[in-house]
Image: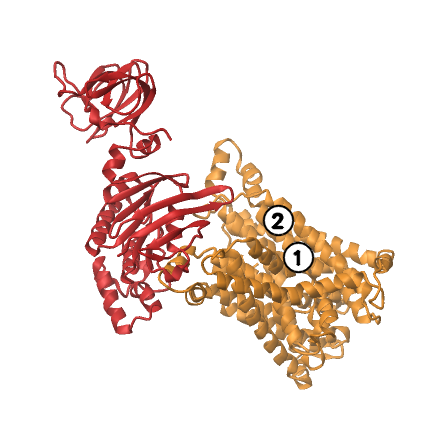
Amino acid sequence: MKFGAGAGFRITVTVFGLLFLGLFFLYPVLRVFSASFLDSSGAQLTLHNYAKVLSSAFYLDSMVNSLWIGVLATVATTLVAAPMAFALARLPLAGKTALMALSILPLVLPSFVGAYALLLLFGRAGIVTSGLHALGIPFGSIYGTPGIVLVYVLTLYPFVLLPALAGFKAVDVSVEEASQNLGASRWRSLRTVTVPIVMPAILSGALLVFIDTLENFGVPFVLAEDMPILAVEAYKLFVGETDTNPGSAGVLGVLLVASTAAVVMIQRRYLGRRRFATGARRSPPLIPLSRGFRALATAYCWTLVLASLVPFFAVIVISFLEFRGPVLHWHVSLDNYVELFERSLRPLQNTLFLSTLAALGAALLGVPIGYVVTRARTRITALLDIVATMPFAVAGTVLGIGMIITFNSGWLVLTGGWFILVLAYVVRKVPFSVRTSSAILHQIDPSLEEASINLGVSPAMTFLRLTVPLMLGGIVGGMVLTWVSAASELSSTVLLYSGQWQTLTVVMFQALESTGAGLAAATASLLIFFTVVPIALIYRLLRRYEMSLL
Amino acid sequence: MTAVAIEGVSRAFGAVQAVAAISLDIRDGEFFTLLGPSGCGKTTLLRMIAGFCELDCGVIRFGDKRIDTLAAHRRNTGMVFQNYAIFPNLNVGANVAYGLRARKVATARIAERVRSALKLVHLEDYEARWPHQLSGGQLQRVAIARALVIEPEVLLLDEPLSNLDAQLRVEMRGEIRQLQQSLGITAIYVTHDQEEALAISDRIAVMRAGRLEQVGTPDSIYRNSATPFVAQFMGITNLLEGKVLGHEGAHLVVEAGATRFRIESVAIAPGEAITFSLRPEALRVLGAGEAPPPDWGVIEAQVARAEFLGTLTRIEAHLPDATMLRIALLDQTIETPAAGQTLSLCYDPRRVSVPERS
């Protein structure tokens, strides 16, 4: 009675959600924290691990490098993407529809494949590098900071582009007109009115970029060479550590989580005080441009979009060429694929199987949670909301380490099978699933559900029969995106996979460690294929919900 | 068809007392309106009856049956929502059938009842249409058919006309009233529009800040407003403050705005302060040499501004001490008065009401 209408359904979802995330997310992460405070046998409390790691120049460097690269990549991405968002929203461009469609792709293409593509083209033995050398043109190194930042910019710019685009489109043009009417030039109006209004949207995108760079494992793994990076070193330490208690890896994990948490908090503080929605009913009109400026703006957008996609395209082309060892020969052949499939079909099957289960699991867990936290604001659902958003700020490496520590022994042993991989994917994708369903629900009037209940259908049945069908488009879109990103998940997979449960990403990871360039290219192409095809199939659906998909 | 008893019902949201210890008896077959400004608690009270809002304390009964402890979907109320809440993924027929399906009515019976419900709201041929093909007024009719087809014990209407344009609003309210009367169903109607409430209701409860200000027939609420708030909320009025001078025959003489008013006798002793309400339309202009009806009060006021509105002329005039007096003249037997002109006005003392100070 005190919990009111539909309490049963609400309480079930809340309790189950908190238990699930508590057991498979909070507890493992907590174990990483506790590991960092325990000695090598895991019996005694100690600060020795922190002393060891923080007094090591190498690990301090890894921290500094991670943050520095993160800042550089975030600033560069924002500076590149915000003007493009403005151009797409307000300027007459050639091929705008195609630009919009293509600019979504980097969001789902696996970034470490992008890094690998860059390596194939501009690496030490890269095609372009060799070509330039043959022509006598010197070419600098793309290893380390420049290459990593470049890959981040090219693969993460949609994180800023999409919210900024929506922001620019939502600016009520009368605000700009008011500014001009009061005597400001068009340029001044843009600078003093439009941009400040859109700023929170841009910054929320920038935050996503920063967090992604901090926790990204694959890109630095491919491109960092000797440069220590937090997420990579945590992985290496954990894999190399022979003690019972992985104390040092734990410390790096804690540092990683602490950095992202700090950034999220700073951003929340900043955005909490700023709400600038002007609620335009129509998109503002396009700004007329001279032919020259128009060509310039068009060229700018197309350059960015193509630069982000060409490397992926190049990987696919290269995968059909013949390799002898690491050396590329310009013969078209299917050898790489033959080699990949002859070894085993299991990685391909595993990837399809695990991603499908992950997409289903994330939706089954995330959609009801999204519903409850959106429709019933209580203190306990607010807590659920926070817990379900937290995996977003926890690096896959840390979650992977935590899951191994937790489920390697004890009353619940999960390591060594497929289930733990699915669990990790579900946990990592739940925030996305929750936020997508919450965003879709905001577009569905709550009185529809009340009408259904009023007509005699119980709240749980109303959710199943009315709300879910109304949300279906968004749910399917979200599931496809979860599927795609689970298929290219690397950071927790490399920790959690075992024996026969290799995925395509693991095969690619191993090929990168050895010199199987042809195998890596073929695997990378398969991953690209499994990313682009589903996205193309549901593209129209995604357009409607694109904003909620970030 | 059910009487609704609301007994000591309260609800607070944080520090705000949305509904404060309200008790109401709504009769079987009555058209009962909850009227008040936004935030007065009228929608909260309606949602408590529907089961969408919990009670902090109190009891709600339909007849003898206590319903506030029932889940919303077991209460058998038919609710019409402000924004219609038509399911966009179902066509008109399926929308109307929704509640019948939930009640596991036999398929053949459903078709029949859907058809007759749609006939009731004059949408016979719209069964296969989709919501996005309908106008606002038609959606409203679907919403009403959907609420009525389940034969609810009580029909609940939450500002159902506020999204329609003015003319359609007047048309629809007539239809809703007619439908309610022909079905003899108990209806509880929420609105902030006093004219709508007056036009449609058997009885009205005027609410303010979670409390009841007055419950009564439209007539009594308009003519004998119980509080100054009700007097002012129910259309335009002159709320005058003055002092009782004494008795004069059956009447009380009151001084307000440096003018002597005659009003019906009330229990206020001479010398005490009094607030009374005199509706603008109760005032009549006396032509030169014209005598007022016997026993009527006569006052004088100077015109400050006159607004000619066609059917009506609204005048703002000043009493001798500059207190504003609003006058509404329905018939144009005289020319629109000019500013500065002094009018001689008369009124029936029975049209003066004395609301209690709240």
* Residue bearing the label numbered 1: A153
Residue B276 in the image: x percent, y percent?
30, 25
Q: Is residue B174 left or right of residue A210?
A: left
Q: Nearer the viewer, residue B350 or A437?
A: B350
Q: Specify the subunit that label 2 lies on.
A: A
What residue type is disc 1 on?
Val
Please, what is the three-letter code of the amino acid marked with disc 2? Leu
Judge from the rendering whether residue A106 lies leftward or rightward of residue A412; answer left or right.
left
Q: Position of residue A77 (x, y in %)?
A: 65, 53
| Image position of B287 with respect to A139: above or below | above
Q: Looking at the image, is mark 1 or mark 2 nearer the viewer?
A: 2
Q: How far is mark 1 from mark 2, CA to CA? A: 15 Å
Examine the rendering and report whether any part of residue B272 can be seen.
yes
Q: Give the percent coordinates (x, y) of residue A464.
A: 45, 67
Can residue A101 be seen here? The reply is: no
Q: Which residue is mark 2?
A: A203
Seen at 85% across and 67% down, the residue is A40
**Which chain is the one coloured red?**
B
| Closer-to-camera residue (A156/A480) | A480
Which one is in front, A130 or A517? A517
The one nearer the camera, A4 or B78, is A4
Look at the image and tell me in which quarter the C terminus of chain A lies: bottom right
The colour of chain A is orange
Q: Which of the labelled discs sits on residue A384, or is there none?
A: none
In this picture, is A60 found above or below A524? above
Residue at x-position 54% and y-position 69%:
A364
Judge from the rendering whether residue A368 lies leftward or rightward of residue B10; answer left or right. Answer: right
The mark that comes first in sequence, 1 or 2, is 1
**Residue B223 occupies quadrant:** top left
Name the element at disc 2.
Answer: helix
Q: What is the secondary structure assignment of the residue under circle 1?
A: helix
Furthest toward the bottom, the residue is: A342
